[in-house]
Image (tube, grey):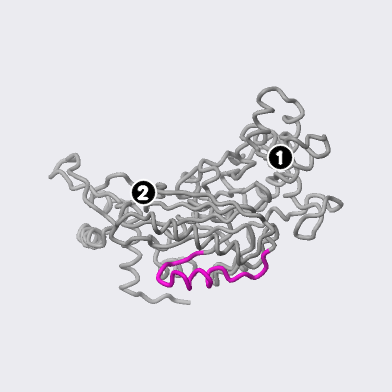
């Protein structure tokens, strides 16, 4: 198929490119933008003038001369509006309000019982969003959108939670419910690990990588895949549901109904199961990874052993991911990511020991930089992506 030209679309694409360059650079001149993009100076100047008029860009002062007149420097105006990011966990809702550079203005965590009805949990989501809106500062655009990460399979186009086994949700039209409350706001519903990958790519450990996989290992396991700087969702949005890769066909039954899923061995579920086996019931009350790591740090060999077991199972699953996607980096986040060296070192050992190509490029296996905020910041990034990349540009880039 031959693509025909569209002057309006080309202008939008160029405007997006210019805005993104300004956003990624602290201070930059029009001449530098023209050099990077290959656009002529008059085109760059016209696009910058529009972005200034739209409040997305501001002039930040006089720069250093490179031979001619000292240039006017430009910066991204992160205060032009604010964004709301929500992570819906298995037993909590974490909400943030940020500026357009993902700097947190306000945040709140609300806990709930996982057996509560969908309607009750959605009411809590609505309540916490209302609080975030109340705390939004005055700005040219106000609140520019709401992004929500959910632990399950999501149809992003319809805003439908198709299946969230740890929440016991099945075909919940979350976006439709929320859109009735806020018809003028863009609302994005997406899998939590996919959003966390986006968060790490835009603002965290993934900034320097073109191809990466983010693994969210907490109560369950999910992943987000970035290929050529773009989030990969798959045909039905189930790309990244790696927690349900089977690593033992005779293994323990998972909440999804299958047996031997990876998330039964490399998540909090495994640690809790091992604590029960070792009669460490006191550690199951107010359980936290931090508590287990502190014990390991203080010389508790049993806790160190349990964390090492988790790390080795983590490495076995990572091997499948590395074979499937051959990424430059794998970022481990969520609560298991907080365990740092206690799980990452055995995971790296397991991968290195089992990897077929010993002399190839070994991927970086690293801890998340954003930690427990990855998903919520990714939810913010998903809205920012809509602002920085217009829908028409995104559509044509995927053809």
If you read the primary sequence from the N terminus, does the residue marked by circle 2 or circle 1 appear first? Answer: 2
Is 18 magenta? The answer is no
Which residue has dot 2 on it? 24
Q: Quadrant of residue 281?
A: top right
Q: Position of residue 258 (x, y in %)?
A: 80, 58
Furthest-right residue in this view:
250
Answer whether residue 46 is visible to the viewer in this image: yes
Front disc: 2 or 1? 1
CA gap between label 2 and label 1 equals 45 Å
The residue beneath circle 1 is 285
Residue 254 lies, in percent from the top left, at: 78, 55
Mark 2: which secondary structure? helix
Please state which of residues 258 and 277 is positioned toward the viewer in this rendering. 277
Whether residue 185 appears in magenta in the rendering, the answer is yes
Horizontal and vertical percent for residue 44? 24, 58
Residue numbers of the magenta segment: 169-188
Observer able to see residue 356:
no
- The reply, left or right, for residue 197 in relation to residue 345 is left
Report the residue at 58% width, 62% height from top.
233
């Amino acid at each position: 198929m031959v693509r025909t030209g569209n002057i309006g679309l080309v202008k939008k694409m160029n405007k997006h490119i210019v805005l993104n360059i300004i956003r990624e650079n602290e201070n930059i001149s029009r001449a530098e933008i023209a050099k990077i993009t290959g656009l002529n100076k008059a085109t760059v100047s016209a696009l910058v003038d529009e972005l200034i008029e739209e409040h997305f860009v501001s002039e930040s002062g006089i720069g250093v001369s490179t031979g001619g007149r000292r240039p006017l420097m430009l910066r991204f105006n992160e205060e032009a509006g604010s964004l709301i990011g929500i992570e819906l966990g298995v037993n909590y809702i974490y909400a943030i309000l940020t500026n357009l550079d993902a700097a947190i203005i306000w945040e709140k965590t609300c806990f709930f019982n996982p057996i509560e009805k969908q309607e009750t949990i959605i009411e809590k989501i609505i309540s916490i969003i209302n609080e975030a809106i109340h705390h939004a500062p005055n700005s040219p655009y106000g609140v520019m959108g709401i992004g929500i990460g959910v632990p399950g399979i999501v149809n992003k186009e319809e805003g439908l939670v198709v299946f969230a086994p740890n929440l016991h949700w099945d075909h919940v039209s979350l976006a439709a419910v929320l859109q009735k409350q806020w018809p003028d706001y863009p609302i994005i519903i997406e899998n939590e690990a996919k959003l966390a990958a986006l968060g790490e790519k835009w603002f965290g450990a993934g900034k320097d990588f073109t191809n990466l996989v983010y693994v969210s290992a907490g109560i369950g396991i999910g992943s987000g895949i970035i290929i050529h700087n773009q989030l990969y969702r798959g045909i039905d949005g189930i790309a990244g549901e790696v927690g349900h890769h089977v690593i033992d066909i005779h293994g323990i039954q998972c909440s999804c109904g299958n047996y031997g899923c990876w998330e039964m061995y490399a998540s909090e579920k495994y640690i809790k199961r091992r604590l029960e086996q070792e009669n460490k019931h006191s550690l199951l009350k107010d359980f936290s990874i931090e508590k287990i790591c502190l014990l390991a740090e203080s010389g508790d060999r049993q806790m160190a052993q349990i964390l090492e077991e988790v790390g080795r199972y983590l490495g076995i699953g990572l091997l499948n991911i590395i074979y499937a996607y051959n990424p430059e980096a794998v970022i481990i986040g969520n609560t298991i990511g907080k365990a740092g060296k206690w799980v990452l070192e055995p995971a790296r050992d397991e991968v290195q020991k089992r990897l077929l190509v010993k002399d190839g490029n070994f991927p970086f296996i690293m801890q998340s930089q954003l930690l427990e905020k990855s998903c919520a910041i990714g939810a913010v990034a998903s809205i920012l992506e809509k602002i920085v990349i217009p829908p028409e540009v995104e559509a044509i880039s995927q053809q």
